[in-house]
Amino acid sequence: MNIQPWWSSEIFWKKTAVWVTGLSSIALILLTMDTIPKISAGSKRVPNYSVINHRIDYTFDESRNFQVPVIGKIEPLFGKELSESDAEALVSHGKMTIQAKNCMNCHTFLGNGAYYAPDLTKAWLDPYWGGIDVREQLMIDFILDPSNKTHNGLGRRMPKLGITVEEAKSIVAFLKWMSAIDTNGFPYNFKPIQQESKS
Amino acid sequence: MMSMKNVSDNSLLNGGQKLAVKYFIVAIVLFGAQILFGLLAGLQYLYPNIFFGVLDFNVNRMVHTNAMVVWMLYGFLGSVYWMLEEESEHPIIGLRLGNLVFWILTIAVTIVVLVYLFIQSGPGDESTLWLINEGREYIEAPRWADIGIVLSLLAFFYNVAATFSKGKYTGIGGVLVLDLLALFGLYLAGMFYTPNISVDQYWWWWVIHLWVEATWEVLVACIMAYGLMKVLGVSRRIVETWLYIEVALMFGSGILGLGHHYFWIGTPEYWFTIGGLFSALEPVPLVAMVVHTVFDAGARHIRNTNHPTMAWLIAHAFGNFFGAGVWGFMHTLPQINLYTHGTQWTASHGHLAFFGAYATIIIALFYLAIQKWRGDVWMAEDLPGNGWKWKWSFCLLNIGMVGMTVSLLISGYVQSQVERAIGGSTWAGYFSAQAHPWFIQGMVWREVFGVVFFFGFVILVWDLLTIGKTETRKAEPNLIGILRDA
């Protein structure tokens, strides 16, 4: 009398679980195979490391309806144009330093990390640096010893992390490169530093 | 025998359960550390000069989150060891190895934490990533420890898979073994270096998301199935059918739900659709779990011999649904995530989700373990002092957590509006939100409720040390059957 309907049987759900898990995993793997080339350095969305030789801007794109990075004229970092491999080495050193100094447990990168300090996705373009003629030096000075620089009314400061000049330069290179990644309009409504009138 | 003391008696436990108790003890210690470092980090939002240059926010926050990940893993390992012999009806294969690995893992964890606290960071080269800190949120453990973790987990996996293979392969056992395999495999995705932060975060999320929103969820579903059979005497057929339903829904939504982390890290726009759709479905299995738990409990008139465990299992069902489900859904669609990504919204969600989904069920297992350890004593009605300790700790922990969650959310609202929508996420926009009175009020209340939570933890530990000690009534095995039929 008590016939169990198929939809409440253990074996039906077991098979469903196996199929759903298998198909989802395959879909994720296929999507990953499509995505990885599209986010590798040198792709349309994630530029080559030598992009640090150029001016980078973040402007509104009518067709996509949000801001996108724009790679402009030659404007080398620290006034020195680098080859692709030298640029990669510099950016990589910056990324390594950012990991070694545990920056991500105060800051966010591409919005991921901790929320005790500003997001660094577009730090290179932040109007805080005043003008592009002083930006590089101000960034390095700040990274070398931020502990005595009050920059907000809260008294919150960044500690001195024992970063060398070389490491500071490489961090700036990494931040410049990161600002050129196409992040689908994140952060939204960002107001970049004024770059045009100076040149 | 009125004054009989139920000193914790190891002989009442099987081999796996003795090992489980060790894991549980370390888990509780790390839980305490998580709370203390959380309180300290929270205090630094209000008084930035506290421990400035000594124990900076990034150190405290890293210890806070890492202690959580590790105590939960310890709780899971302990829970699995706890049920392994009963479930497989076979003594654990390679138990000596399991014991050895426990000590190695615990020593490694201690070293990692000491290095975090006293060395903190190093020069920007490979040596730091190998020896001090990998600098990637949640999986900061240096590479040497990563390798140790993988080897330890492999040994653990061997214990589980070999024991089930030798003994009885139950439905729970089958799901557990496959889930653990996925869980360990995924950790490998986080063990490499690349200068490309988009590629870095792409794989980093494989570890973080596919752990906490897929494999961990299935793992606790297995623990829940065991717990419901144990505490309420629900039949195996019912819990295992539900387990398969939950696996289907969980992996069906959670695996591609990974896409909600791929909106803003450089990944293509099609992830908006995939991530938005599938992550919006992620609450569905959590609803199923609530229905399952509450129905089973109600069908048995919540009669059982272990009230604290039952209460925490129900807290788990609701906490998982609200914390992971509702709080996650609130900001998972890209249209809103654009303004909430990287704000205190995430912290709010993270707090309630980790507590609701994972802390609760591990605490439930603590109580299940202490009951047996004291000699299968009665832990339901008419406890000494009306069981005030477990009830107070239960209330304080839950109220403290909900309070923190809501406070963080209010601060998050301010950030979304002032920093993101208006300020455009510049440095100035960030600090104008941080200085906003509403934001600061949220931070104050978070700290207040954090202290409430801490008191709940203290009473929890006190209770676990004392509950059942003077109890003479037994939780007779057949009593569950009697209660079930009542």
Image (tube, grey):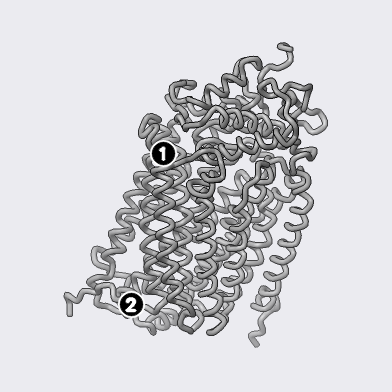
Tell which of B190 and B425 is nearer to you: B190
Helix, strand or loop for disc 2:
loop
Q: Can residue B349 be seen in this view?
A: no
Question: Label 1 crowding class (10 Å Cα cut-off): few <14, some 14-19, many 20+?
Answer: many
Which residue appears at 39% of the width and 49% of the height? B114
**Residue B251 image point, x, y percent:** 65, 62
In the picture, measured across the screen, residue B50 lies left or right of residue B241, that is left
Q: Quadrant of the N terminus of chain B?
A: bottom left
Q: Which of marks 2 and 1 is in front?
A: 1
The picture places residue B52, in percent across and down from the top left corner, at: 39, 32
Please give the name of the residue rendered at 51% of the width and 43% of the height, measured from the top-left corner: B347
Q: Residue at x 32, y 50 (%)?
A: B455
Query: Mark 2 = which residue?
Result: B376
Q: Please determine whether, in this image, residue B381 is positioned above or below residue A181.
A: below
Q: In this view, does B24 lie above or below B443?
A: below
Q: What chain is tagged by disc 2?
A: B
Of all residues, the one furthest to the right in this rendering is: A63
Residue B7 point in image, percent of width and height: 24, 73
Q: Which residue is disc 1 drawn over?
A: B42
Give me the chain letter of mark 1. B
